[in-house]
């Protein structure tokens, strides 16, 4: 054990956990990383390309190395950073990306072969022989790549999604964020304070600075308690704000149950969409390292992380208690680590400072003007080589802290593509002035990293942000703390013959950057893409600036001239489960149920998805073993007796007003204004580009009252377009529109006995052919006073009606019709029979109205009236549409029991089949029990003049070919006598 | 994104359906000699500016108003919104 | 310098001292036979084919940023030739054939990987539409297979077969489809064009066209004026802006399309899979990241970034289709600007101005088209006649009524 004294862990709450099957013990308050370190575990993983042994490098979400798979089974979560995984009892973690044990990874052979795997090598080889890429090279590369593995099981946990609104969102709960939140909260503003950590305090928890002479946690705890007690504050620990979107909207993920041994019964994570009037970005800073030879061994970590482990988690970063630690720094900050380690009783070899003539700040040795030029230790650091004035010497150490300076965490300030700007005093990029509107970077996130500076800046930025929205906030009393300005030098990397890692996870070294320069991949984006630098799970948080510095050195340009890559969401990885917000499985989309849905369910109906609707597709009866039996029966019932079908899903739009007739004349391609009251007309709608858009019926219930029906699929869009025409094109017309699709249940009553059936429910209404002819409509009452609308329209070609009642009576109406029609053979039919009936009658549906067809193609060219303007009329006359030669035809297979599948292509018999000779396609196909034959509809070139010709319908996709006779589209009752009787 | 509805205040853009350039309100005269060409330009051609753009949004999940929103396509900043039916004249952009 | 395994071996053993720049960084000459505006995939492929196929080497590619900085470096890397309409399918099949020989043609491993694409159908109507499309693929020689639910279940057991809002009914597979390494494609064409004498000029933005008597004679740039016999514009995403400098309005809107990549994972998804009942498509890169995308954000934008609703929508689609990916993490998202055309299909054509040629309107399907787009645009520039596979991509097809509308949604760019 290398556990130290003190720290913010609860020693009364020990927690057992396993890593690679071995049991260890940590405490409440530990992360997996701190617990592993406290158990003397340095080796935790393998790198991506060379499979180099790797240890914990940071103490935060920027961790490039210490990725593990957490939990097991369906809950296995790959690539989890051990540095942010909160320890819980029974936590199970495994290391990743190795074959065989972690200590003896067989893939480590890649390291020996590393000279061949230089940047971009794969673009230059594996090209011969051609077929070997998919068969040999790529599978090998794919197997070797990747990090952790998915379980391939569905995620068993539940997720939630929520919306929050506030005056001020404070991102980050360290010194800056707490100070900002407190300032704003006391001013009465609605405040949300979010921090990715499970404990507020940020670096205050990691440093040894005193506030008002007491441990910083005293102030942190007091502040959090005050904030928690205020009704206008929402504290959100374990919440990562991952993206800055437009207009003050932020994406955030709250890890609700990830820290619990068993998350069952709880939401695991919640996706929050936070809309903030203003925000303070108090995301702190991320330390950078200094590349040197062999700098990637376990035991080498950021010096600031070392302080965090020692101070917050009471863990020494060595394998064996008492092993000395060295610090390599280019500024004052590294010395703080030496002092804190000494204070915790950890022996310090000394501080190697690249600056000449630097004095120690305490009782340790300083190697001024020194650099680290080599390391030893296969699975953990054992020794370092220090070089000063050309003299090198080896020193045994158990760990090495590297302090290269701090980069303000500008990520969220750069999501709107504003570029950070270089600050030559800070030697770092800070947020630019063109950041997201309403965002105020504060504290270390804009280079004000001292504790006092951070506290003050958080307060000031909160005041500024609130004053922007007219809220006046007062300064608050801040705790007293000495601010020691940390000096730093521009020392970026130690030149070396051996490999010096810049990006640890993706194994990008200084040599790779040099090669990239040689090959003219010098633009920062080329560098990144050629070497994969910054593209690992940490997105280069610890490596990008160092890489820029190396490239700047090679080109002779400055770092800001060399540029910076674009920051993009998310700040850290976000699970796809939570981004989906739990809207998965059956909840993926809303389900709309028709008024007779429950009735149909009770009848044992099979259902099908029609857009968002669920519709009964057929109603199997006892003894029917195949869906065709049910459908054939339903079809024949309609042809011989009477069938009932819920057609509520068709769109219904109520159109009223003095100019309703004129309005509809402009909406429909055919004349609608001349429609008589009490009559219905079939209508076509075109898109403005002249193509066929939708069809349906239009009923005139009064002089200034029409009811438009649309197809199920286009119900929403047709209504939207009509509102567009009304509000945007012709606002001068006196017309009002409302969608009534959900207000009216509508049932088709179809078949020779439909009149007899309806006669039994209408309240003294004359249904005779003379009084209520084909295409008549009326408002009436049924069943003794229920208001209803009756339309004598037919999709099946039989005598038929559609009857509409207020939606809540739909179920009762269906029951009543079934009841009173029992002796007439009243039978429900579903969408399958509906489809057969309409194909038999040659009516167009979705397959024919697919947005690529025209009225001409349907043989309805005359329905585009030349006498008036309407949407699409002008453009329907363009050359390409006017000269279109394909026409809808009926197709009878020469062999009646062969089904020509929809989607087959049509050819003149005997021609070679290719795209040039292609003459059309089959749109719809079904078995007609009425004709005892399969039938089909299709678009065929010059189809209207080829009646009787036998053509070929080819389905090479499934190896089929059929001969079919071209026939008129009306397979049933071509004269239309039945629907008019 | 948040759209400042003239009647309902700031509304999430998810409540709206987008159509495109507000020039789609300027439907040409169908009786003009050049009607076919005019309609082709109207239906197919767009200024597509990188910058301030007047565009049509339909408050589909709301009050069913068509709005003209003025928005910068480079920054997504919204400069204003008005009810399409309030606009007096068609023809001018 | 020829790239090969032997060469890599030799350099590895001698400390990588012999590598040369992938391309030169020349200063622009005063005049070229042909100038290509735009150093993205299509522009670089055009330059390559001008030099390699049509023997025209006095060519410059002008790129305002860095080579490959457009949508070629910001897409989901899918290649396929599974279109429906006769105006499209032969072109994309031509492109697929060029992909199949690309690495040998360019002496650069762009990692063309024919690991298949499967488009899933969730209704009978969708299956019928895929059958029509699959037959068009067969008629153009592209091949394809219609898979049953059972076959799919065997191949892709991790899809949601048992608890789906929209059950999987069938799938249309093209085995020859797959992915290619997007940056590698740009670099491969760039290097091959440079080796044949084409000048690739980075950080050179075109600021205007020189037009005399209805003829374009050169361009103004941030690096000075350059004369040209012909100018070809291939700047998808910025087409309207660039062509406005020549006084043209286009049948194009610019929209943002977001794309996403997960953290690296061991291989689980072999080919490309597209969801037919939501906006989601996915493949897995050789590095292990799940590369996925969905619908465009849906409003005009040049901002190269999108918003949260689409992120959520895409993730919902992914989770609905393959709930096993839930514990993978989104690593990075990005936004590219698409030339969304009025019929969803591209334009490769001359313009009303002599000497000015346009390659535009690729919607979000431009990556797979890169080889054929370059070939056909080069053909047009070299011969002034459209290539046989690109005859439908005319600018006047809109006005004449010959749109190529695969989705059948009309002149509504954000629906294509």
Image: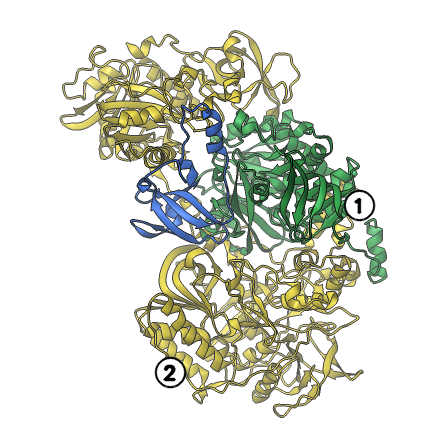
Outermost residue on the front side: it is C213
**Crowd class of label 2 (few under 14; some 14 to 19; many from 20; radius 10 Å):** few
Say the numbered circle drawn on residue A477: 2
Residue C244 falls in image quadrant: top right
Question: What color was chain C assigned in the picture?
Answer: green
Which chain did the image draw in yellow? A
On the image, the x and y values in percent for residue A768 come to 20, 12
Q: Which residue is mark 1?
A: C197
Describe residue C239's horizontal placement relative to residue A645 as left or right: right
Of residues A829 and A375, the one nearer the viewer is A375
Q: Check disc 2 and report its element: helix, strand or loop.
A: loop
On the image, the x and y values in percent for residue C93 come to 66, 32
Residue A12 visible somewhere in the drawing? no
Which chain did the image draw in blue? B
- At 68% from the left and 90% from the top, the residue drawn is A365
Of residues C42 and A714, the one nearer the viewer is C42
Q: Nearer the viewer, mark 1 or mark 2?
A: 1
Chain of the residue that carries numbered disc 2 in the rendered image: A
Q: Check disc 1 and report its element: helix, strand or loop.
A: loop
């Amino acid at each position: 054990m290398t556990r130290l004294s003190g720290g913010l862990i609860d020693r009364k709450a020990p927690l057992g956990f396993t890593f690679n099957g071995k049991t260890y013990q940590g405490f409440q308050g530990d992360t997996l990383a701190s617990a592993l370190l406290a158990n003397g575990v340095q080796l935790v993983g393998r790198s991506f390309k060379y499979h180099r042994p790797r240890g914990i490098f940071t103490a935060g979400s920027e961790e490039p190395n210490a990725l593990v798979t957490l939990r097991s089974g369906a809950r296995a979560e790959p690539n989890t950073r051990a540095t942010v995984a909160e320890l819980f009892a029974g936590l199970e973690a495994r290391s990743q990306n190795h074959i065989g044990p972690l200590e003896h990874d067989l893939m480590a052979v890649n390291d020996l072969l590393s000279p061949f795997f230089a940047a971009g090598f794969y673009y230059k080889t594996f090209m011969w022989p051609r077929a070997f890429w998919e068969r040999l090279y790529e599978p090998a590369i794919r197997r070797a790549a990747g990090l952790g593995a998915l379980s391939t099981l569905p995620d068993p946990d539940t997720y939630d999604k929520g919306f929050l609104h506030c005056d001020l969102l404070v991102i980050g709960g360290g010194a800056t964020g707490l100070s900002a939140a407190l300032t704003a909260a006391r001013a009465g503003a609605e405040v949300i304070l979010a921090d990715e950590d499970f404990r507020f305090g940020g670096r205050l928890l990691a440093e040894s600075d005193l506030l008002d002479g007491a441990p910083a946690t005293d102030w942190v705890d007091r502040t959090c308690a005050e904030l928690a007690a205020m009704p206008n504050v929402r504290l959100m620990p374990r919440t990562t704000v991952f993206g800055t979107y437009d207009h003050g909207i932020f994406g955030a993920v709250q890890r609700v149950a990830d820290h619990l041994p068993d998350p069952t019964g709880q939401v695991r994570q919640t996706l929050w969409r936070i809309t903030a009037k203003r925000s303070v970005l108090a995301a702190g800073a991320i330390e950078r390292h200094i590349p040197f030879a062999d700098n990637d061994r376990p035991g080498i970590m950021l010096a600031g992380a070392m302080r965090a482990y020692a101070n917050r988690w009471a863990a020494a970063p060595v394998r064996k208690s008492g092993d000395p630690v060295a610090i390599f720094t280019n500024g004052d900050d590294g010395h703080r680590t030496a002092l804190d380690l000494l204070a915790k009783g950890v022996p310090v070899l000394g501080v190697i400072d690249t600056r000449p003539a630097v004095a120690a700040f305490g009782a340790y040795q300083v190697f001024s003007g020194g650099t680290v030029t080599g390391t030893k230790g296969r699975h953990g650091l054992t020794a370092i080589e220090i070089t000063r004035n050309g003299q090198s010497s080896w020193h045994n150490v158990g760990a090495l802290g590297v302090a290269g300076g701090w980069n303000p965490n500008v990520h969220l300030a750069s999501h709107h593509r504003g570029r950070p700007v270089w600050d030559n005093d800070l030697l770092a990029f800070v947020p630019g002035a063109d950041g997201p509107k309403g965002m105020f970077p504060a504290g270390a996130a804009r280079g004000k990293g001292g504790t006092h500076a951070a506290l003050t800046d958080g307060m000031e930025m909160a005041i500024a942000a609130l004053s922007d929205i007219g809220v006046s906030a007062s300064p608050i009393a801040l705790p007293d703390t000495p601010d020691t300005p940390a000096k730093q030098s521009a020392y970026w990397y130690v030149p070396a013959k051996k490999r010096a890692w810049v990006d640890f996870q993706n194994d990008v070294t200084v040599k790779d950057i040099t090669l990239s320069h040689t090959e003219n991949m010098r633009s920062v984006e080329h560098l990144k893409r050629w070497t994969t630098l910054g593209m690992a799970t940490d997105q280069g948080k610890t490596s990008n600036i160092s890489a820029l510095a190396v490239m700047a050195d090679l080109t002779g340009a400055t770092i800001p001239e060399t540029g910076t890559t674009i920051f993009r969401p998310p700040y850290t990885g976000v699970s796809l489960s939570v981004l989906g917000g739990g809207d998965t499985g059956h909840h993926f989309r809303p389900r709309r149920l028709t008024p007779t849905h429950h009735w149909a369910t009770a009848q044992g109906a099979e259902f099908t998805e029609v857009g968002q609707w669920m519709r009964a597709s057929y109603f199997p009866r006892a003894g029917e073993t195949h869906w065709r039996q049910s459908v054939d029966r339903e079809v024949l019932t309609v042809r011989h007796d009477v069938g009932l079908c819920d057609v509520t899903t068709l769109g219904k739009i109520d159109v009223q007003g003095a100019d309703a007739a004129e309005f509809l004349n402009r909406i429909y391609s055919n004349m609608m204004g001349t429609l008589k009251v009490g009559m219905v007309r079939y209508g076509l709608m075109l898109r403005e580009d002249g193509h066929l858009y939708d069809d349906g019926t239009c009923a005139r219930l009064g002089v200034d009252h029409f009811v438009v029906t649309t197809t199920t699929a286009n119900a929403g869009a047709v209504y939207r377009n009509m509102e567009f025409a009304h509000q945007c094109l012709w606002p001068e017309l006196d017309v009002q529109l409302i969608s009534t699709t959900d207000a009216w249940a509508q049932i088709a009553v179809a078949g020779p006995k439909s009149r007899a059936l309806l006669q039994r429910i209408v309240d003294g209404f004359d249904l005779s052919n003379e009084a209520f002819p084909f295409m008549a409509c009326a408002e009436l009452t049924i069943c003794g006073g229920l208001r209803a609308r009756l339309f004598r329209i037919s999709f099946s070609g039989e005598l038929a009606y559609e009857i509409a009642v207020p939606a809540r009576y739909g179920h009762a109406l269906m029951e009543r019709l079934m009841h009173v029609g029992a002796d007439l053979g009243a039978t429900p039919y579903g969408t399958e029979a509906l489809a057969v009936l309409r194909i038999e009658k040659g009516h167009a549906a979705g397959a024919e109205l697919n947005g690529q067809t025209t009225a001409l193609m349907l043989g309805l060219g005359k329905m585009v009236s030349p006498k008036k303007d309407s949407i699409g009329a002008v453009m329907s006359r363009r050359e390409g549409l006017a000269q279109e030669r394909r026409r809808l035809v009926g197709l009878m297979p020469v062999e009646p029991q062969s089904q020509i599948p929809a989607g087959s292509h049509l050819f003149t018999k005997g021609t070679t089949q290719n795209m040039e000779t292609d003459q059309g396609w089959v749109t719809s196909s079904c078995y007609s029990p009425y004709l005892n034959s399969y039938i089909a509809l299709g678009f065929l070139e010059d189809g209207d003049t080829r009646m009787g010709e036998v053509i070929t319908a080819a389905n090479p996709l499934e190896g089929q070919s059929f001969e079919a006779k071209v026939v008129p589209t009306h397979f049933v009752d071509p004269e239309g006598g039945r629907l008019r009787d | 994104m948040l759209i400042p509805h003239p009647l309902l205040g700031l509304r999430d853009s998810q409540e709206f359906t987008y159509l495109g350039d507000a020039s789609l309100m300027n439907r040409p005269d169908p009786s003009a000699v050049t009607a076919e060409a005019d309609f082709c330009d109207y239906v197919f051609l767009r200024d597509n500016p990188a910058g301030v753009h007047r565009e049509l949004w339909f408050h589909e999940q709301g009050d069913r108003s068509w709005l003209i929103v003025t928005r910068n396509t480079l920054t997504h900043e919204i400069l204003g919104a008005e009810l399409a039916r309030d606009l007096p004249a068609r023809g001018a952009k | 310098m020829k790239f090969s395994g032997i060469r890599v071996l030799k350099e590895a053993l001698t400390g990588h001292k012999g590598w040369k720049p992938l391309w030169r960084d020349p200063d622009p000459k005063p005049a070229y036979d042909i100038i290509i505006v735009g150093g993205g995939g299509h522009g670089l492929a055009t330059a390559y084919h001008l030099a390699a196929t049509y023997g025209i080497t006095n060519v410059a590619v002008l790129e305002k940023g860095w080579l490959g900085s457009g949508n070629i470096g910001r897409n989901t890397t899918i290649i396929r030739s599974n279109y429906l309409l006769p105006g499209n399918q032969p072109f994309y099949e031509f492109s697929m054939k060029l992909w199949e020989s690309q690495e040998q043609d360019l002496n650069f491993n762009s990692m063309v990987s024919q690991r298949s694409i499967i488009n899933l159908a969730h209704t009978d109507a969708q299956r019928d539409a895929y059958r029509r499309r699959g037959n068009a693929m067969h008629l153009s020689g592209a091949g394809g297979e219609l898979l049953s639910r059972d076959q799919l279940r065997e191949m892709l057991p991790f899809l949601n077969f048992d608890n789906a809002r929209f059950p999987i009914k069938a799938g249309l597979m093209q085995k020859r489809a797959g992915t290619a390494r997007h940056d590698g494609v740009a670099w491969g064409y760039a290097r091959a064009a440079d080796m044949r004498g084409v000048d690739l000029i980075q950080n050179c933005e075109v600021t205007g066209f020189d037009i005399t008597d209805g003829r374009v004679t050169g361009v103004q740039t941030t690096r000075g004026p350059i004369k040209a016999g012909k100018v070809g514009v291939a700047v998808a995403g910025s087409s309207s802006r660039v062509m406005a400098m020549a006084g043209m309005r286009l049948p194009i809107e610019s929209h943002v399309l977001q794309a996403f990549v997960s953290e690296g994972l061991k291989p689980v998804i072999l080919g490309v899979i597209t969801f037919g009942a939501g906006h989601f498509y996915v493949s897995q890169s050789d590095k292990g990241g799940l590369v996925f995308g969905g619908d465009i954000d849906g409003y005009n934008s040049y901002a190269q970034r999108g918003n949260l609703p689409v992120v959520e929508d895409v993730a919902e689609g992914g989770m609905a289709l393959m709930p096993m990916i839930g514990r993978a993490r989104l690593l990075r998202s990005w936004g590219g600007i698409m030339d969304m055309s009025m019929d969803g299909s591209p334009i490769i054509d001359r313009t009303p101005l002599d000497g000015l040629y346009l390659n535009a309107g690729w919607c979000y399907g431009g990556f797979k088209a890169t080889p054929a787009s370059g070939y056909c645009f080069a053909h047009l520039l070299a011969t002034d006649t459209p290539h046989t596979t690109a005859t439908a991509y005319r600018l006047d097809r809109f006005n004449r009524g010959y749109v190529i509308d695969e989705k059948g949604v009309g002149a509504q760019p954000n629906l294509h």
